[in-house]
Image: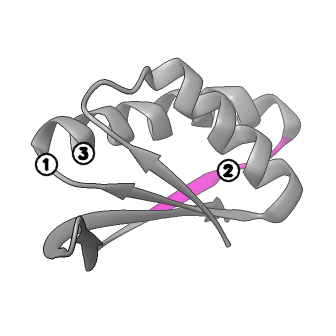
Amino acid sequence: MEILKVSASSQPKSVAGAIAAVVRHDDEVELQTIGAGAVNQAVKSVAIARGYVAPNGIELICIPAFSQLEVEGEMKTSIKFVVGRR
């Protein structure tokens, strides 16, 4: 599964385009976020991506979950979103 890292400075339209492209090709993509700003941008991106793929008859689902990531040798709690087709 392809992994997209989303930060607080990520542009939602750009992330949405990447989500749409991956879902059209691979059926699922994982978004990794650390921090409230990154979560906000990821959620907006999923909402925008729904509009991008809906004309093709694709309905997106989003499953959020906690995960642990190692960043610069330190473990951080993150929220991941698995986005795929219904």
Q: Over which residues does the magenta segment extend? A: 57-62
The residue located at (30%, 24%) in the rendering is 9
Q: Quadrant of residue 85?
A: bottom right
**Disc 1 versus disc 2: distance between alpha carbons?**
27 Å
Image height check: is 62 above or below 36? below
Image height check: is 40 above or below 64? above
The residue located at (22%, 66%) in the rendering is 78
Image height check: is 63 above or below 38? below
Residue holding disc 3:
39
**Disc 3 versus disc 1: distance between alpha carbons?**
6 Å
- The image quadrant where one finds the C terminus is bottom right
Residue holding disc 1:
35
Q: Residues within 10 Å of mark 3 (few under 14, many from 20)?
A: many
**At numbered mark 2, what does the secondary structure look like: helix, strand or loop?**
loop
Please tell me whether mark 3 or mark 1 is closer to you in this view: 1
- Kindly indicate whether the residue at mark 3 contacts the one at mark 2 (C-beta within 8 angstroms): no
75 vs 20, left or right, is left
State yes or no: residue 51 in magenta.
no
Residue 26 position, x and y percent, is 82, 63
- The image quadrant where one finds the N terminus is bottom right
As drawn, the label of residue 8 is none
Of labels 2 and 3, earlier in sequence is 3
